[in-house]
Amino acid sequence: MIKKFAIFILIQSTLCLHINVLYAQDTTKIMLDTTADFTKEEQQLIDDIVENRTIPQKDKVQYFSQLTRYGFKNLFPSYTYNTSQSYSSQVNPHAESYMQEYLRKYGRGLVNMKTWCMPYFNLIDNILTQYGLPKELKYLAVIESSLKPSCTSWVGAAGPWQFMPYTAKDYGLVMNGTIDERRDYFKSTHAAARYLLQLYKQTKDWLLVIAAYNCGPGRVFSAIKKSGSRNFWDLQYFLPEESRNHVKKYIATHYIMEAGAGEMENNNNNASYASNSRVATATKKNSSSAINPYNSKPTISIEEMQLAETQTVTGKFNSIVIAKNISMEVLSFNRYNPLFDNSIAANGRYELILPEDKMQLFLSKKYQILNECVQVMLGDAEVPGNVIVYPNKKNTFTQQGRTKKH
């Protein structure tokens, strides 16, 4: 009896081993197929960038841009959104109905975001460009965290890019009792760029990258295997529901942020939403024309104004870099100095207003801050040092019902 049982166990173990080998072979085949367009040298280059946590050399950036520009092939027939044509006429028809539903639910909030998001978008654009990645990927941070560095999910993902602790460490972010670089806009965006580049090397499709960012690449490879397709619209129902909706949220956010306000107004009959669209149009016009910095009134109390100091500044200053160096929340900085980035870019000067202690700190580091702003603008800066400003617990935004795998 014991002998028969031992033989049974041996046969069962052999079958399990055989199945695991076949599964491993299938998984390896999927991995190889998804990276077929990359040579071994190109794959090694991406691996080196990820492992060494470096920015690609400038001669490689344009090359990466050419490789990654085709990643939206399953969203736009021409690989990218053409601003001279209507969005609806270009986007994949599968996305249309979801886009309109998302627009009705969240369009107002996203249009309002367009009035304050530009400093964040400028910073993210600059870093993504250094890795040869499409600037449109910045909208992933919108659906992940609403651009809030204080955002924390119930499963422990944190920062504007919602990194889980183990992935954050893999991509070079420091977390200990006093610092959490997931909340550092500069460093977390560099880490996100490296992670997105690695995911693209594996999937060769940005919609699949966005799905993998939510549920992990393993589940995307499983969906590819089950569906026999690498087209998101064909394999979407083999993905977790949250992950396929994550992709659709990204598409809808891309639409709201990129499409003209007039087009969004035509697609929505709600009067209050149309009003917000006109606000967005006015904001867009203001950003492209000269702005009088003395017409930009701060939204602070009389008491705060009395305790503040004023200093005229000139040069290529950036609000996020200033706020970081004086240990001030960006939203608080913007309350004192609305339209700072647009105004100083258009006019070359701005009447800077800060609390007395922050102004003294700014003046003591003025040229260091200016130098860092110029480096960030030119894209020559390495990941800069940072002082983390932690929000009060009452301001922490918690996302419910999220399962993060990255």
Image (spheres, grey):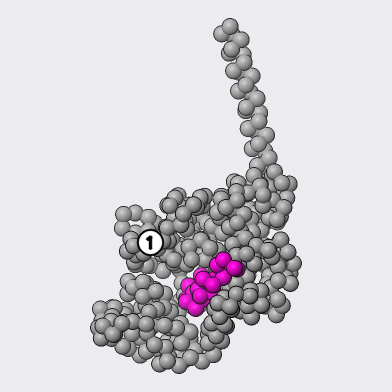
Mark 1 closeness class: few <14, some 14–19, many ≥20 residues within 10 Å: some
The residue shown at (46%, 54%) is 400
Tell me where residue 214 appears, x and y as whole percent. Answer: 55, 54
Magenta span main SS? helix
Q: Is residue 383 magenta?
A: no
217 to 71, vertically: above or below? above
The answer, for residue 146, to whether it is visible in the render is yes
Label 1, secondary structure: give it.
loop
Q: How many marks?
A: 1
Tell me where residue 375 appears, x and y as whole percent. Answer: 46, 76
The residue shown at (37%, 77%) is 333
Q: Residue furthest top?
A: 1
Relative to 367, is 219 on the left or the right? right
The residue shown at (48%, 84%) is 342
Give the quadrant of the N terminus: top right
337 to 157, vertically: above or below? below
- The amino acid type, in three-letter code, at marker 1 is Thr
Tell me where residue 166 appears, x and y as whole percent. Answer: 45, 49
Q: Is residue 109 magenta?
A: yes
Q: Nearer the viewer, residue 341 or 234?
A: 234
Q: Nearer the viewer, residue 257 or 149?
A: 257
The answer, for residue 359, to whether it is visible in the render is no
Relative to 199, is 77 on the left or the right? right
Tell me where residue 153 appears, x and y as whole percent. Answer: 44, 55
Toward which corner of the image does residue 105 lie, by quadrant?
bottom right
On the image, numbered disc 1 is attached to which residue? Answer: 396
Q: Nearer the viewer, residue 254 or 225?
A: 254
The residue shown at (59%, 46%) is 218
Span colored in magenta = 103-124
20 to 188, vertically: above or below? above
Q: Nearer the viewer, residue 343 or 247?
A: 247
